[in-house]
């Protein structure tokens, strides 16, 4: 009986934990630190991505003017109801904004939220050690160029 009591918590975790999403695992190219290359003199920007034990992705974006923090963004990529979402949490919005994935390839993704003011569309594409993130909507587009950090 004692052996069963010791084994029960282990079996509960193994049987009841949710399996990691295979879709989320396709984003492994995103892992790590990315340094923005197309910034004005005196500024810098970075993104960092990690996959959490449950399979979701946690990202952080930060921009600096000199040594002062000028922008911070918390980002997640989650699976909910068998759909992937890019979830952006920025100070300008009261609540996190959900962008639904509309395309996922081995080297990128597209996600959209037509009801959001700006951006309505977010695209990430990787090529080797370079990453481009493009936000767009209302005939406006902004490209963020990154190189893989250490």
Image: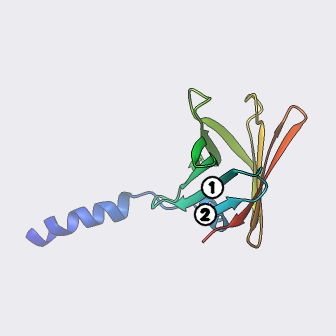
Farthest-out residue, left: 2
Query: Along the horizontal axis of the image, is 6 left or right of 68?
Result: left
Q: Which residue is mark 2?
A: 33
- Going by the image, does 43 lie left or right of 77? right
Which quadrant holds the C terminus?
A: bottom right
Residue lying at 72% horizontally and 65% vertically, measured from the top left: 147
Residue 144 vs residue 100, the one in the foreground: 144
Look at the picture and state if 92 lies above or below 75.
above
Q: Position of residue 95 (x, y in %)?
A: 56, 29
**Would you say the residues marked 2 and 1 are in contact, meaning their CB atoms lie under 8 Å apart?**
yes
Q: Nearer the viewer, residue 95 or 24?
A: 95
Q: Residue at x 73, y 30 (%)?
A: 116
Numbered mark located on residue 47 in the image = 1
Task: Out of 78 and 116, give the one closest to the viewer.
Answer: 116
Q: Residue 27: x, y in percent?
A: 65, 63
The percent coordinates of residue 84 (x first, y second) are: 64, 49
Mark 1 nearby-residue class (10 Å; few <14, some 14–19, many ≥20): many
């Amino acid at each position: 009986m004692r052996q069963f009591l010791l084994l029960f918590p282990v079996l509960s975790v193994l049987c009841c934990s949710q399996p990691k999403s295979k879709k989320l695992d396709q984003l492994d190219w995103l892992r790590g630190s990315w340094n923005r290359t197309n910034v004005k003199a005196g500024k810098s920007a970075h993104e960092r991505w990690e996959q959490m034990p449950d399979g979701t992705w946690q990202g952080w974006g930060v921009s600096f003017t000199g040594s002062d923090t000028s922008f911070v963004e918390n980002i997640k990529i989650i699976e909910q109801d068998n759909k992937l979402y890019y979830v952006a949490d920025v100070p300008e919005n009261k609540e996190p904004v959900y962008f639904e994935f509309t395309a996922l390839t081995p080297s990128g993704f597209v996600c959209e939220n037509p009801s959001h003011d700006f951006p309505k569309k977010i695209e990430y594409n990787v090529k080797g050690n370079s990453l481009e993130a493009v936000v767009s909507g209302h005939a406006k587009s902004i490209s963020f160029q990154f190189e893989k950090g250490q």
